[in-house]
Image (spheres, rainbow, N blue to C red):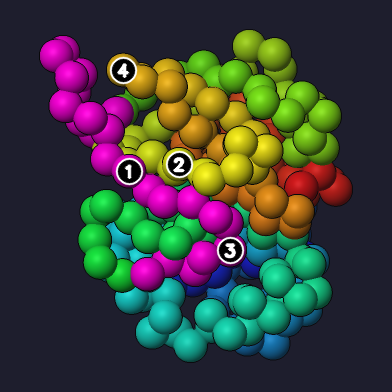
Amino acid sequence: MIVVIDYAVGNLAAVANMFKRLGVACEITADAEKIRRADKIILPGNGAFDACMQGLRATGLVPLLEERVLQHKTPLLGICVGAQMLGHRSEEGSEPGLGWVDMQVRRFPELPGLLVPHMGWCSVGREDKAAPILQSLDTEARFYFVHSYYMQPVRPQDVLLTAQYGIDFTAAVQVDNITGVQFHPEKSHRYGKQLLGQFAGGGR
């Protein structure tokens, strides 16, 4: 069973529906017992960083998530702001992040002709070609992005995918059982389906 953490933000139904199309059992929940029994966890996120962190903390689930993800090594996938929340802090706000990945979140710079937020389809480059979550992914894969801020990991080895929008930026991170993607796989058609299917099937 995969659980999508319900803390009243993000496109929860779209994520769950993608797994259902893959034939994978998935439930949107804030129930602690269901999260404790989950094989894998999705942390969605949409909107402002501070609002997402406040919403997640208000559920009281952060200690349980830390137990499952950090101690028991349950695979977790953060999506969009859910991926940014894995780091220490964002330039968008003042709330501390979860701190599970050694990274900060930066705003895109003001460059001539560069519109922020970055919205639309974008190709990605693979930094870790052996990562299990990428194994079924087409080499020409593109994903749908909507964001004004991007992840900036401290350690180069934590970068899983990169993309380019005025600057080169990190499109996905991975540290052990923790993965975060800046894009929306649930909106990325067959490429998103490939990535979520690999996550569900054993790839971290």
Asked if 16 appears above or below 167 in the picture, the reply is below
Hey, what amino acid is under mark 4? Gly
Question: Disc 1 on helix, strand or loop?
Answer: strand
Q: Which residues are magenta?
A: 96-118
Check residue 166 in the rendering and tell me which mark sits there, or answer none.
4
Hey, what amino acid is under mark 2? Gln
Question: Disc 2 on helix, strand or loop?
Answer: strand
**Badge 3: few (under 14), some or many (20 or more) residues near its Cα, within 10 Å?**
some
What residue is disc 1 on? 106
> Quick one: 152 or 28, which is closer to the camera?
152
Asked if the residues shown at circle 3 and circle 2 are in contact, with their CB atoms under 8 angstroms apart, the answer is no
User: Rounded to the nearest whole Å, what is the CA distance between mark 3 and mark 2?
Assistant: 13 Å
Nearest to N terminus: mark 1 or mark 2: 1
> Quick one: 161 or 76, which is closer to the camera?
161
What residue is disc 2 on? 152
Asked if the residues shown at circle 1 and circle 2 are in contact, with their CB atoms under 8 angstroms apart, the answer is yes
Residue 70 position, x and y percent, is 71, 71
**Badge 4: few (under 14), some or many (20 or more) residues near its Cα, within 10 Å?**
some
Nearest to N terminus: mark 4 or mark 3: 3
Asked if the residues shown at circle 4 and circle 1 are in contact, with their CB atoms under 8 angstroms apart, the answer is no
Residue 23 at least partly seen: no
> Quick one: 109 or 3, which is closer to the camera?
109
What residue is disc 3 on? 100
